Image (tube, rainbow, N blue to C red):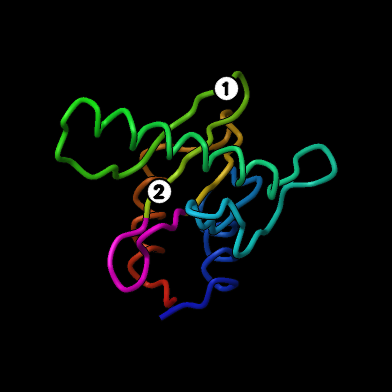
Amino acid sequence: MLSVETSLKEAMTSIEGSLGAALVDYTSGMALGTLGGGKDFDLTVAAAGNTDVIRAKVRAMEMLGLNEEIEDVLITLGSQYHLIRLLKGRGGNGLFLYIVLDKGRANLAMARHQLKRIEAGLEL
């Protein structure tokens, strides 16, 4: 089992093109841990903003009567991928892993696979 800090380090080192990673509580909008980012990209602000994305999607699914769980959300920008993976089980309810990837260097399928693996080893 991996701690939050170790899980974020694993995401940053094992996922090609990683620019930043965070574990976020989407009930409060608070980042429980961040790694990477920089002066031009504040991960705590991004975490709070992506909380609104998840809340909006959950509301839309409820209004549509969809009885499904969100696995992940992908936001594609000109030079970046923003990948949000909702955590399930073992106290993960209300949490998501968030990773920012350099679009030119990242392999999106492998990034999704690695996030799933990291989630399985995360101890909360």
Q: CA distance from mark 1 to mark 2?
A: 17 Å
Instruction: Please state which of residues 89 and 113 is positioned toward the viewer in this rendering.
Output: 89
Q: Which residue is mark 2?
A: 85
Q: Which residues are magenta?
A: 87-96
92 in the magenta segment? yes
Residue 55 percent coordinates (x, y): 43, 39
Name the residue at the top extreme: 78
Quadrant of image for the C terminus: bottom left
Q: How far across and how far down the image is residue 112, in percent? A: 38, 46
User: Horizontal and vertical percent for residue 26?
Assistant: 49, 51
Label 1 SS: loop
Element assignment for label 2: strand
Q: Quadrant of the N terminus?
A: bottom left
Q: Quadrant of residue 46?
A: top right
Q: Residue at x 40, y 55 (%)?
A: 114
Q: Inspect the image, locate mark 1, and give the three-letter code of the amino acid beneath it.
A: Leu
Q: Which residue is pictured at 34% across the width and 33% down the height?
A: 59
